[in-house]
Image (spheres, rainbow, N blue to C red):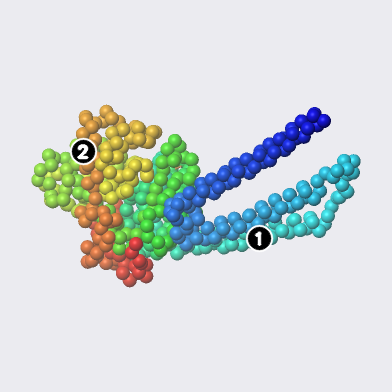
Amino acid sequence: MERRNHDRVGRTSASSGRRRGVASRVVTLGVLAVSAVLLLTACGPSGLKPYSTTSPASDGAEGINSLYKLVFWLALVVFIGVQFAIVYTALRFRRKKTPDQRPPQIHGNSRLEITWTILPAVVLLVILVPTITTLFDEHDALAESDLVIDVYGKQWWWEVQYGEDGAQGGQNLGVITANELVIPANRTVKIRLHSNNVIHSFWVPRLAGKLDVMPGHVNEMTIKTDKTGDYYGECAEFCGTQHAWMRFKIIVTDQDQFYGWVNGWREGNLIATQGDGTNLPEGVTRAPAKFNICLSCHTVNGAEGSVPPDQSNGAQLTGLEARANYGPNLTNIACRSTIAAGMLENNVDNMTLWLTDPHKVKPDNYMGDVIKPSTWASPDEAREMAEFLESLKPAGGCFNENVGAAAATPEATPGAVTGASPVASPATSPVASPAASPAAVVTKP
Ligand code: CUA
């Protein structure tokens, strides 16, 4: 009797212990689920999703996002259907209490087999039709493009070269810059992707699909958006140790600002690389002596042509003749928002850091093979160079701090712009924002 009681007490405490176990497991799972949901929603705080394909900001990205949503919801329906079928089958046909009784053995069920062949085929067809339509839309957009930009994947940065501009009568804009593409809103911009080294991938999630940048083949894509602003991009294909630091940015501006930026670049920076810095023409800056080291890999354009040699008071001016594009073109470098391909904010302190020891900031980059801490006689010398570089901006200020700068050159008309290539003819002729173009009717940010 006493023993039975003891048993009963034991059983009771065991079953209540099991209940407690189940309860605590449910609580743990609940907490995990709530945290997971919170964590996932934290990925996109207050609608700011700079790297999200689900916040499309261009026609192409809208198309891709619609496809994504279609595939997602279809996949969800299929997933729930399959899970339901698994759970139902497992419960309905689970082992009965009579262990010896085997379930009826079935071979072949035509109706079932036809169903599970046709259903996936229908699902695939529903996905296939809009996919092909989107592909053709993307392809058709290439034919509509009227501004060509060539982008070169380097290790590890992006060179950006502006080509023919339909709004300027097919003139080659000639702008060469790095890591920041300025494009006008409401224009279909064609981007041609090149590489002479390894395979990279050009991806601006909010504006376009991901496209490989490969040696020996030029891939093309278009971007058209009516939303001005900054859009962030990444290299999306492993391309070496600094692959993660191969970022870039697309800055969508209105048409006036875009041509203001183009003209600022064509105007260039007036720099003297020799002489004692006295008797310089107005607006010309004497570069620090060691700037010649920079010029063995980089270009700063503009001096040639804007200041004819006979007016340069004997100072040797650098310009388009110094076409070393081994490293990024440094024209108007002060107007760029970042340096080292999106790694550092562009300011004197960071530029000093970068110049002092590029390998410390970004290991393995090519500049670090040339520029070392021993390049500089003192930390002040590196800082002096940084301050000089941060002064390289157009006379009228940077395009993004001086909206409508293009209006300063009203005498130029699209037809008046001559010279197909700014390399052959010094880039001094400003281009005007084509007022007649329907694309000029854009909203300012
Ligand atoms: Cu270029 Cu990764």
Q: Where does residue 368 sit, x and y in percent of width and height? A: 34, 33
Horizontal side, residue 304 vs residue 313: left or right: right
Q: Amino acid at mark 2?
A: Glu
Q: Which residue is mark 1?
A: 125
Q: Quadrant of residue 119?
A: bottom right
What is the crowding at mark 1: few (fewer than 14 residues within 10 Å), some, or many (at least 20)?
few
Q: Amino acid at mark 1?
A: Leu
Badge 1 vs badge 2, beta-carbon distance below 8 Å: no
Q: Residue furthest right?
A: 100
Q: Quadrant of residue 348?
A: top left
Of 257 and 164, the residue lying toward us: 257
Tell me the residue at 57%/44% (across/down). Answer: 31
Q: Which residue is mark 2?
A: 384
Q: Is residue 210 visible?
A: no
Q: Give the vertical position of 7 relative to 71 (above or below).
A: above
Tell me the residue at 34%/62% (across/down). Answer: 445
What is the crowding at mark 2: few (fewer than 14 residues within 10 Å), some, or many (at least 20)?
some
